[in-house]
Image (spheres, rainbow, N blue to C red):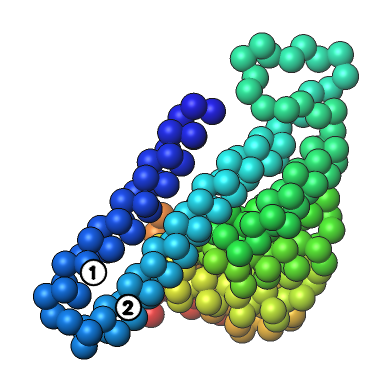
Amino acid sequence: MAKRFSRKKVKQDEFVSTIEKIYEFLEKHVKKYGKPILGSLGIILLFGVISFSINYYRTSREEKAQILLAKALKHFNAAVIQPGEDIPQELQVPVYNTEKEKYQASLKYLQEVVDNYHSTPSGAIASYYQGLSCAHLNRFDEAQDKFSQSLDDPLPKINVPLARYALARAHEAKKEYEQAIKLYRKIYKKDSDFIPKDEALMRMGFCYDKLNKKDKAIEQYRTIVNEYENSIYKSEAQNRLDSIASPASANKISEKP
């Protein structure tokens, strides 16, 4: 608590010190240059104070949001202990009896972050984790809403591909394969630094397969087999090719173009 107060005190002193310096500058330069400069300096001062105040306010809100988010995520990452099972003394997270209880509780605590700090990055992250909680509870309509909300809010860049991927998986769970494919294609083109390209290709192939678009599915699986030598999906992709392609096509597919 003392540390938080100290950090807040430093920021308040910084704010006061900045204002005092601005007034000192004005006092010296208005006397020297007269009234013509007063108007422009007043405008500069106004925008400077507004900008500083907004940044200070945003920083303060985000710090508070991060603290609340950290508390909420302890419930998302909570341990599930069966009745009668010993609880390790070193355990630093809450304990629940079932996965359902755990994710229902995490939804409640994450909602507190969303309600109070929805316009902050931490608020957007809270929405993302709410989506994951809903997915674990098989509430995929709500999961989609939460993932979409997180993408609409100021979600940190590193979390955007994860939210997009999670949203695509929610569409898959609801058998909305066309929507899922659109997201996987975007992930493949834009987010490959965060989500492996062969992962996106495999998911697209699966969705095309479900839509009975065999040629499209073959195209995705073929790309994995031919271009991703060390892919963990290579064997599965080849098996899927063998199951949906004719013998002649399968032989052709296994050859690099």
How many numbered badges does the structure rendering display? 2
Q: Circle 1 — which element?
A: helix
| Image height of 10 relative to 97, above or below | below
Q: Position of residue 171 (x, y in %)?
A: 74, 70
Q: Position of residue 14 (x, y in %)?
A: 34, 49
Q: Position of residue 118 (x, y in %)?
A: 65, 61
| Image height of 213 relative to 228, above or below | below
Q: Position of residue 87 (x, y in %)?
A: 74, 15
Using the image as rendered, state which of residue 163 and residue 39 is in the foreground. 39
Using the image as rendered, state which of residue 87 and residue 1 is in the foreground. 1
Inspect this view and state whether residue 163 appears: no
**Are there few (<14), some (14-19), or many (20+) residues within 10 Å of tag 2?**
few
Q: Circle 2 — which element?
A: helix
Residue at point 58% right, 41% down? 67
Quadrant of the rendered structure where residue 242 is? bottom right
Residue at point 83% right, 50% down? 137
Which amino acid type corresponds to the residue marked 2 in the rendered image? Gly
| Image height of 80 relative to 239, above or below | above
Using the image as rendered, state which of residue 101 and residue 178 is in the foreground. 101
Which amino acid type corresponds to the residue marked 1 in the rendered image? Leu
Residue behind mark 2:
42
Give the distance between the C-alpha atoms of the residues marked 2 and 1, in whole angstroms. 9 Å
Q: Earlier in the sequence, mark 2 or mark 1?
A: 1
Residue behind mark 1:
26
